[in-house]
Amino acid sequence: MKLINQINTEENLLINTVNNTLQLAKKIANCSVEVFVKKTIGININIRNNIVENIEFNSDGALFITVYNKFSKGSVSSRDFSINGIEKMLKIAIDISKHSSSDFFSGLPNIELLCFHADELDLFYPSELNIKNGINFASIVEKEAFKFDKRIINSEGSFFSNHVTMNVFGNSLGMLEKYKSTLYSAYSCMIAKEKNSMQRDFDYSTSRKIEDLEKPDILGKKTAKRAISRLCSKKINTMKSAVVFSKEISSTFFSYLVSAISGDNVYRKSTFLLNDLKRKIFPNWLNILENPHIKQGLGSKPFDNEGVKTTVKYIVENGILKTWLLNNYNARRLGLISTGNSGGIHNWIVSNKNISFKELLKNMNTGLLVTELMGQGVDIISGNYSQGAIGFWIENGIIQYPVNEITISGNLRNMWNDILTISNDIDMRNNIQCGSILISEMQISGN
């Protein structure tokens, strides 16, 4: 109850802050104004070897003001929500706009795109910020990991967090909307040793509701099992082979598409997909649906960072790229309209062939299962791909042994077209929800 009262008080303060900013802007600014204020309250707890290393209490808020003075833009941010502070911010933003170059494409979104009635997306499930319970959760995770197997010899730490975020947005076109959300997270990383081999691995859980978090004893056992599975890793020979991206990293595989079709990269002509809108870039059976309105979704939002209403849409349908990801500015640069993606994507759902992970490995028969990637080796301009990889070697559809110190490489265009199937072991912990992915062939560099 105490937290609820605090949140209600804070939310009313944020609404008043946006209202005050818009009212002051009418008096002192003969220009368009956009106001966004965000406040996060929560705790972060880190323990290691059953010792509390860090406890943080967060109560962070910021006010962002953007003015459009004809076709010139000025933006400022501050933590000062007082009337005097807001007035100073407005004057600074106006002064910045006067010294900024004119850009015909800048300005507020068209009024018909704005969200004047935010949908209720069921994102808010607060629980009291209880330090003792958080410490107990993280401690159980570590305790269960150490109990699981004597080869678990150390911990890189376990983590628990509980946060509430409030968002209020308004502009001079009459929009004033809000939404709030909760997010709970738990993470653990353990170290295993056998003979001369030492490995670490991690697991995590995240959700809108605290009761939907992985139970701490289960999370601890999973983390220990993952670390142990990597012991006595081997290098493999350089070759071309089928590759599976496990569900834990499959979201990363599709995150490259996010960059490749972002409006900024498109209008700057810095993407290898520049000429591929309305063309086939994936197999015919593959679809990617963006649904910002999933109840309790980790990527759900009623409106984007510019106040544009989010919509359900196909990103890829029957293998064909259907849309760019546009905010207001880059949409105008391209002669299009905003897709409601200012600030990123909102719940991508990647289709699968409704087969299990076990069946996926059988379909591959022999090849590499990748469970972790390292490095930043992706060039969105050319589509060339090269990353360090850790995983397991598969023969006859069965895991044989762990592998490390290898690199996998290819080109994203070929990799996407070479997807044979996706299993139904969907990882729900990410903004991109996808199962494990089987690719027919990639270059593997090892010995």
Image (cartoon, rainbow, N blue to C red):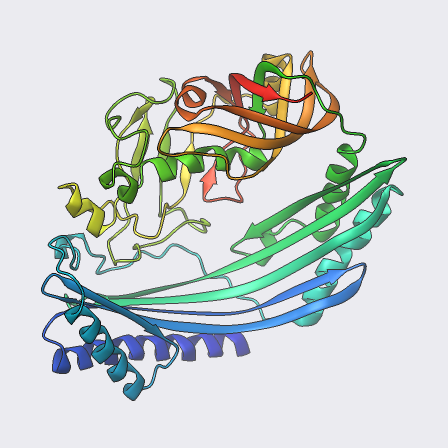
Q: Is residue 276 above or below residue 7?
A: above
What is the quadrant of the N terminus in the image? bottom right
234 and 214: which one is in front? 234
Q: Is residue 419 left or right of residue 293?
A: right
Q: Is residue 338 left or right of residue 380?
A: left
> Image point 54% across, 38% down: which residue?
427
Q: Nearer the viewer, residue 174 or 106?
A: 106
Residue 121 seen by the camera: yes
Q: Quadrant of the C terminus?
A: top right
The residue that appears at 51% across and 55% down in the rendered structure is 208
Q: Quadrant of residue 136?
A: bottom right
Question: How many dots with numbers?
Answer: 0
| Residue 337 shows in this picture | no
Answer with left or right where residue 397 lies relative to residue 282: right
Residue, x 15% and y 47% (percent of image)? 332
| x and y, in percent, of residue 85 in the image | 31, 84
**Where does the image place residue 44, in percent across and percent down from the top left?**
61, 65
Q: Is residue 323 above or below residue 25?
A: above
| x 54%, y 44%: residue | 429
Residue 366 in picture, x, y percent from top left = 64, 13
Q: Is residue 240 left or right of residue 172?
A: right
Residue 400 to residue 120: above or below: above
Instruction: State whether residue 240 is above or below residue 42.
Output: above
Quadrant hosting residue 280: top left
Q: Position of residue 379 (x, y in %)?
A: 42, 34
| Occupied quadrant, residue 262 | top left
Q: Nearer the viewer, residue 42 or 213?
A: 42
